[in-house]
Image: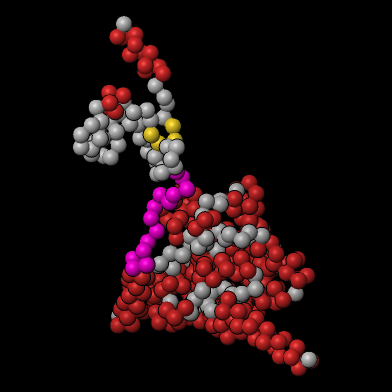
């Protein structure tokens, strides 16, 4: 009889239910009757864990809570400062050991100068195109497989939005587009107008290490100015924006593959800005090759949507480089931050959040003054 009574009690025991008081996020189950009845004395029959003996507590399944804690301000500032110190130390060591660095650069240039692929007329466009793939795949892995880094996202609430990486619709189309619309015309042009051998004959001597670094920064600066002019023009005329640039602004949440979400006309303008920069500065072929890889990475980084402490815009002091946070705001607002990398032109012309606010206040003052005069 006792066995039957116990079996009946086990069948009628309530299942685990949510805490009706709403306090806490854990689940509570039916409490063991014998332990509850003996709940007298200190502690009320509870264990040192703070719950009644026999209480079922499954793990917290609230997925709205972040699985990884974001870095504190102190940790963030320390990491950024460590990255800046590392870069500055590398530059100082490069200057102090510039003769050894020059020898390394000379050996590298002598080696690649004999390679057929470096002497090929289409080497630079092929290098630029192939450089997109490892950077895109790297940020795709971070987006889809490394949630520990999602708290670095510029828009943390949208860090789970992965529709950009739909291979059947977006990614595959963009990869085909950049391979066909960008690479094929350049291959055809290089085939009918071979000219790289003249450039290599002109630069038979290797560059110094300091010249290599200086030319890369100069190329980025000149490209940025030219792109600023073209980018602002696209936004200034609604019809031009709709037909040329609107496709790039389809999503308000940027992902790395937005760097290649471009129309043919926009891709043409972007490439022409880069070609004009290398021809204006008459950069060394080795500097141009390194610049091609670096600018591709910066383009992908600019649209990745993350704000890592070791990124270029955090390493550069005084806010000289905008980086993904500035470009993300450009995709959200559309009327600020037209420069791609640097910020000085946007600041000078007032194409920032503070500049727009200041212009709105000045316009309001002018309107009030005119109304008072009309009265």
Instruction: Tell me where residue 332 appears, x and y as whole percent.
Output: 61, 65
Give the residue displayed 71% in from the left and 90% down from the top: 369
Give coordinates of residue 219: x percent, y percent. Answer: 53, 79
Quarter that holds the C terminus: bottom right
Q: Do we see residue 108 in this rendering?
A: yes
Q: Locate residue 362: give its quadrant.
A: bottom right
Q: Is residue 125 magenta?
A: no
Please tell me whether residue 9 is drawn above or below residue 345 in the rendered image. above
Residue 8 position by quadrant: top left
Looking at the rendering, in which quadrant would you find the N terminus?
A: top left
For this rendering, which residue is in front, 187 or 169?
169
Q: Main secondary structure of the magenta part?
A: loop
Residue beneath the point at 75% across and 66% down: 242
**Residue at 23 percent of width and 38 percent of height:** 43
Q: Which residues are magenta?
A: 61-76
Q: How many marks?
A: 0
Relative vertical location of residue 136 with respect to residue 368 in this rendering, above or below: above
- Of the pair 332 and 128, the residue shown nearer to us: 332
The extreme bottom residue here reads 373
Residue 52 shown left or right of residue 345 in the figure: left
Quadrant in the rendering for residue 262: bottom right
**Rendered location of residue 124, percent (x, y):** 56, 68
How is the model colour-coded?
secondary structure
Residue 65 forms part of the magenta stretch: yes
9 vs 274, nearest the viewer: 9
């Amino acid at each position: 009889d006792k066995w039957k009574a116990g079996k009946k009690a086990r069948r009628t025991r309530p299942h685990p239910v949510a805490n009706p008081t709403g306090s806490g996020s854990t689940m509570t189950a039916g409490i063991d009757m014998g332990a509850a009845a003996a709940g007298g004395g200190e502690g009320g029959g509870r264990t040192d864990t703070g719950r009644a003996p026999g209480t079922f507590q499954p793990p917290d399944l609230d997925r709205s809570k972040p699985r990884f804690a974001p870095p504190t301000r102190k940790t963030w500032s320390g990491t950024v400062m460590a990255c800046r110190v590392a870069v500055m130390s590398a530059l100082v060591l490069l200057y102090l050991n510039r003769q050894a660095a020059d020898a390394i650069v000379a050996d590298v240039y002598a080696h690649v100068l004999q390679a057929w692929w470096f002497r090929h007329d289409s080497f630079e466009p092929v290098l630029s195109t192939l450089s997109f793939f490892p950077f895109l795949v790297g940020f795709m892995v971070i987006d889809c497989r490394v949630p520990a880094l999602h708290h670095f996202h510029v828009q943390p609430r949208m860090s789970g939005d992965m529709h950009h990486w739909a291979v059947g619709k977006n990614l595959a189309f963009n990869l085909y587009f950049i391979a066909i619309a960008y690479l094929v015309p350049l291959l055809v042009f290089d085939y009918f107008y071979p000219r790289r051998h003249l450039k290599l004959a002109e630069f038979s001597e290797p560059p110094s290490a300091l010249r290599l670094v200086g030319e890369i920064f100069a190329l980025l600066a000149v490209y940025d100015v030219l792109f600023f002019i073209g980018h602002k023009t696209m936004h200034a005329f609604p019809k031009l924006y709709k037909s040329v640039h609107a496709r790039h602004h389809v999503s308000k949440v940027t992902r790395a593959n937005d760097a290649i979400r471009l129309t043919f006309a926009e891709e043409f303008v972007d490439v022409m800005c880069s070609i004009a920069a290398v021809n204006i500065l008459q950069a060394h072929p080795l500097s141009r090759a390194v610049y091609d890889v670096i600018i591709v990475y910066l383009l992908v980084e600019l649209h990745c949507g993350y704000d890592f402490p070791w990124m270029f815009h955090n390493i550069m002091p005084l806010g000289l480089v905008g980086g993904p946070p500035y470009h993300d705001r450009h995709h959200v607002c559309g009327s600020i931050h037209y420069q791609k990398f640097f910020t000085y032109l946007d600041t000078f012309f007032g194409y920032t959040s503070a500049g727009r606010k200041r212009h709105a206040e000045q316009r309001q003052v002018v309107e009030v003054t005119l109304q008072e005069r009309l009265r």
